[in-house]
Amino acid sequence: MDEREPLSPDMFDPACPSSVAPFRIADKWGGLVILCLQDGPRRFSELRIPLPRVAPKVLTETLRALERDGFITRTAYAENPPRVEYQLTPLGRTLLPAISACREWAADNFDALLAARDRYDGVPGAEAAA
Amino acid sequence: MDEREPLSPDMFDPACPSSVAPFRIADKWGGLVILCLQDGPRRFSELRIPLPRVAPKVLTETLRALERDGFITRTAYAENPPRVEYQLTPLGRTLLPAISACREWAADNFDALLAARDRYDGVPGAEAAA
DNA sequence: CAGTATCCTCAGCGATACTG
DNA sequence: CAGTATCGCTGAGGATACTG
């Protein structure tokens, strides 16, 4: 019934941590969570797949903060085992264009940033690529 | 000779701290510094005008980080008293569209964020504005 | 499954004072 | 003018273990 793709462990490149990017959306992981939700609701454990290095406590904090800001809703179903779904609100969706602009910047200019950083740090051979 | 407007102390609203916005560009003040530089080079003390609450140490750190990432250049003139100018690089200018997207989001949706936050926090009367 | 509960660390940020 | 030098704090983030 659910034809959406499962979230991949490779969805975000671990070698390319968001901490290097000059943009941060919400808190450290907020932007990535929003991207995970853009195709429809997801469960807590689903979100852990593409974000394996985020401790459950931190993921909970991230989700609560996004909920507080009105970007996502949390729906708990009274079942056993329990099921909880997180889903973007219309307000949350308004973030997507700006997030896209940030991602587009990164796609176009991330290498230049890294090169500049190497040059500044005096990494050998960094001068070659002006 | 310099026809550019001086930077105003009111350039950034102190009642609307960037810490509330879901976007952060570079470090806490990086995005604002970039905006200050978009019309041309500025001196250290010029930048302090619109950012009076940023300690000089912090402004220096911000500028060094932006320089390291290749977003700005620092030019010191051997004069007395000393003069130093900071200026956006072409790479730094590539950030402007994405920053604009973030600002546009804020202009359109900031009130809704604040309202959602009040509702979540149970602020009296926040329910009225759905 | 979907989280809590505890404990901990550290870097980002700030205040104040001083200087070539 | 354009910064350094110190000191200090807080809170975001993380590691690990446990639970209804």
Image: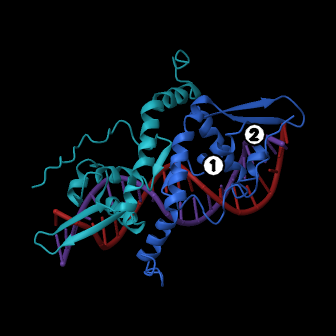
Chain colours: A blue, B cyan, C purple, D red
Q: Which residue is mark 1?
A: A32
Q: Amino acid at mark 2?
A: Arg
Tell me which residue sits at (45%, 77%) in the image: A129
Tell me which residue sits at (52%, 23%) in the image: B123
Residue B9, above or below A13 = above
Q: Which mark is residue A19?
A: none
Residue B16, above or below B1 = above
Q: Residue B107 appears at what percent x and percent y? A: 42, 33
User: Is there any visible trace of residue A26 in the rendered image?
Assistant: no
Residue A41, above or below B63 = above
Tell me which residue sits at (47%, 75%) in the image: A118
Which element is circle 1 on? helix
Residue extending furthest top? B128
**Which of the chains bears the disc numbered 1?**
A
Q: Residue A48 appears at what percent x and percent y? A: 75, 50
Quadrant holding the N terminus of chain A? top right
Q: Residue D4 appears at what percent x and percent y? A: 30, 72
Specify the quadrant of the image occupied by residue B103.
top left
Residue nearest the viewer, comparing B86 with B54: B86
User: Is there any visible trace of residue A52 in the rendered image?
Assistant: yes
Residue nearest the viewer, comparing B68 with A112: A112
Q: Which residue is mark 2?
A: A42
Which element is circle 2 on? strand
Q: Amino acid at mark 1?
A: Leu
Q: What is the C-alpha distance between the residues marked 2 and 1?
A: 13 Å
